[in-house]
Image: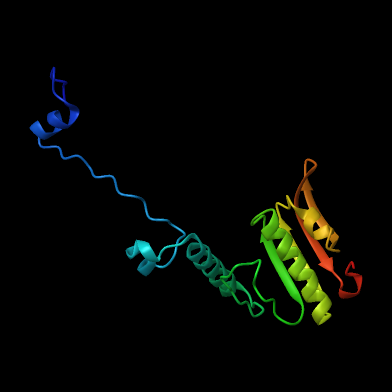
Amino acid sequence: RVIAAPGRSRDARRASIGVRRREKTPAPYSGGPPLSHRQDPSAFTPALALVSICKNNLSKVARNQTLATVRLIQADASTFELPQGPITAFFFNPFKGPPLEQVALNLTKNAARTGAEVWLIYINPLHLNLFIDQGFKVVHSLSHRKILLAVVAQMQPNAIPE
């Protein structure tokens, strides 16, 4: 135990008895990108961290069951060119306003162009109205204490609004 000496700072008291001050180092992001990205801070981005977490989660699920083919894509969602065929889009309240409006419009246009249906899984659907306005129909919802937690919605190609 160090007893305070008048006029001496805490660091001076520690130094007098040989206690070194611990340097503050940032804690590594536990779910972040692979170690190589942690070693080079300039290579770290939040998007890389999210992709890394997603890959890690998929590998855990794949150990216990057979998965459909999953492709992870890191891109600007508002300008991403959607693939041909049926689409299942998963959102966990990712963004709001114009970017989300554009994504909803892109999904609708893709359904009209390809004739394929689009499924939407939306967790914490704060901006569900943007998808409803584009013609998505809610086929299942999950609520708790009158709070909407998640929805599954579908866009039928023949139900696209003009």
Q: Nearer the viewer, residue 112 or 60?
A: 112
Indicate the quadrant where residue 145 lies: top right
Q: Position of residue 100 (x, y in %)?
A: 70, 59
Q: Position of residue 13 (x, y in %)?
A: 13, 28
Q: Nearer the viewer, residue 115 or 67?
A: 115
Q: Is residue 104 above or below residue 115?
A: above
Q: Residue at x 67, y 76 (%)?
A: 81
Q: Quadrant location of the C terminus?
A: bottom right
Left or right of 151: which side holds 52?
A: left
Q: Quadrant location of the N terminus?
A: top left
Q: Is residue 34 above or below residue 116?
A: above
Q: Residue at x 54, y 72 (%)?
A: 59
Q: Position of residue 150 (x, y in %)?
A: 74, 54
Q: Nearer the viewer, residue 34 or 84?
A: 84
Q: Is residue 18 above or below residue 9?
A: below
Q: Nearer the viewer, residue 65 or 55?
A: 55
Q: Position of residue 106 (x, y in %)?
A: 74, 69
Q: Residue at x 83, y 76 (%)?
A: 112
Q: Residue at x 17, y 26 (%)?
A: 9
Q: Residue furthest top?
A: 6
Q: How many marks?
A: 0
Indicate the quadrant where residue 6 lies: top left
Snapshot colouring: rainbow
Left or right of 102: which side holds 115?
A: right
